[in-house]
Image (cartoon, rainbow, N blue to C red):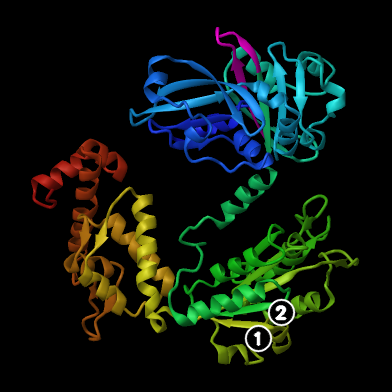
Amino acid sequence: MNNICNDFLDKLYNPAIVCNHSGKILYTNIILDNIFKYIRVKKPKNIQSLDPDFDFQKIKKHKPFIHTLKIKHLNSRVTIYSFKDNNNETNILYLFDKSILDNPTIDQVIEHIDEVVVIFNEYGVIEKMNPLCDDILPFSRSEVIGTSIYEIAKKGLVTNPIIIDMLESKKKLYRNVTYPNGKVIAYTAVPFFRSDGDLKGGVLTGRDITRLIKLENQMKFDTPQPETTEYISKSTVMENIKRIVIRAASSDSSIFINGESGVGKEIIAKTIYRYSQRRGKPFVAINCGAIPTELMESKFFGYEEGAFTGAKKGGKKGLLEEANVGTVFLDEIGELPMEMQKKLLRVIQENTLTRVGSHTPMRVDIRYISATNIPYDELHANKKFRQDLYYRLSVIPVKIPPLRDRKEDILPLIEYFLRFYNEKYNRELKISPTVMNLLHEYNWPGNIRELKNMIERFVVLSTKDIIREDEFNMLINLDTINESPSANQSSVIINGYTNLNEVYRVVDQIMISKAVHKYGSINRASKELGINQSTIHRKIKNGHIQL
């Protein structure tokens, strides 16, 4: 049984069972599961519990095979089919007649199904609906039962109904419908056929997927990326920090994250947001070091129309106003000028802000997360950072140690980024144990950001399937520039080369040979690299490149 088959059976209004040649039950659809549950019958493991006359060879020989079964006090005619599954194995389908559902007991089952259920005949006349329809559909059951869907559409109660399209196409159809109240319902319309092949009606089921769509939209923010992934770690110190962060996230306390560049301060900030009571509300990240000083006030607080030359008509919200009822992440807050620190402190203290050009303060409700790479001692120097602002923002301080001080996290990070970039660039690059050890012992002055960039460099530039020590030494030093200590000889050394032409040759060998192998032809490789194919032919001919 595959998922497509299971999904189809779950959308049938007829109860259904699938078993194998020995009678072992492989699948029961949702409606039959509900019947078992409602009449308090334990779901059987073998069809012989329901059909003592089960005979696999007889069913194979005479198909379809019509039989009568009894489930507790419910009698039903059942049509039995044999069919081949994806593995070419013969399975048996017991399809119960819909009449079993006319029993008052089964009516109760339909009433309790947690989906919209609408039963209609071949003319589109609505025969039965469950109570959930009253909560979700734009009309009540009393208005439409016994009425044709064509008449319902004519009255304007529905637009472009899926039932009409299904009756015309006689095929199973899917459609998502968004209602004015914001609800999104995923509908499935399934046709029923008589034994002679004529259409005899169908069933419409609908599931409220509003919450799923909201979660999907949130997942766009949560989806693991190298810049925004969950914090990958195994070290005790980071696991303790994550536990503290998750506990603190549920409060509205201000959190101050401190750590070197590249340790993942923004990832921690977004983790706090995801676990906070304000998740789903605005999350506004402000890079305090990237805003010109003269624009800071208008960027943070917004401005009114006419506040200055070039001000937009109608004014503009500031970043803090955009974050109202949500969370603001003040990244690189140590770069804020002292005057701006003073104005920000006033907003935090009073929970109000005033747009540039206005005299009317507006109330704001914001949760603050801050981050900086300024060393701890400088944070406590009043000339560098206002201490009253620091203590307002650091109710819960979080200090993230550099990667070199928690080497247990290096290998998990390498594995994560290697998987990510292998998938991104369609490669299956591996790293030899020797190189893994070298990476583990490396000091990583750029922390996680440097490690991420290094793994991407390996995946993009490596000409082999396994990074070994020789290629590692070349690639890890590709961006290293050392000046000779001799004042008279200020030579530049890159990867051991002092001649720029030699460096170009190394890069050509890596990128051109890799492109030719990847794309299978010099013509395609030249297009991808943005150079003439004659250039590649010339470099191969003169021995500059070896393929």
The span picked out in magenta is: 186-201
Labels 1 and 2: the sequence-earlier one: 2
* Mark pair 1, 2: CA separation: 8 Å
Is residue 428 a member of the stretch shown in magenta? Answer: no
Q: Secondary structure at mark 2?
A: helix
Instruction: Residue 4: tell me if it is visible.
Output: no
Q: Quadrant of residue 290?
A: bottom right
Q: Are marks 1 and 2 in contact (CB under 8 Å)?
A: yes
Which residue lies under the disc numbered 2?
341
Q: Quadrant of residue 60?
A: top left
**Residue 25 position within the rendered picture, expressed as x and y whole percent measured from the top left:** 47, 36
Q: Residue at x 53, y 32 (%)?
A: 50
Which residue lies under the disc numbered 1?
385
Looking at the rendered structure, the kind of residue marked 2 is: Gln
Instruction: Residue 222: tell me if it is visible.
Output: yes
Q: Residue at x 26, y 71 (%)?
A: 436
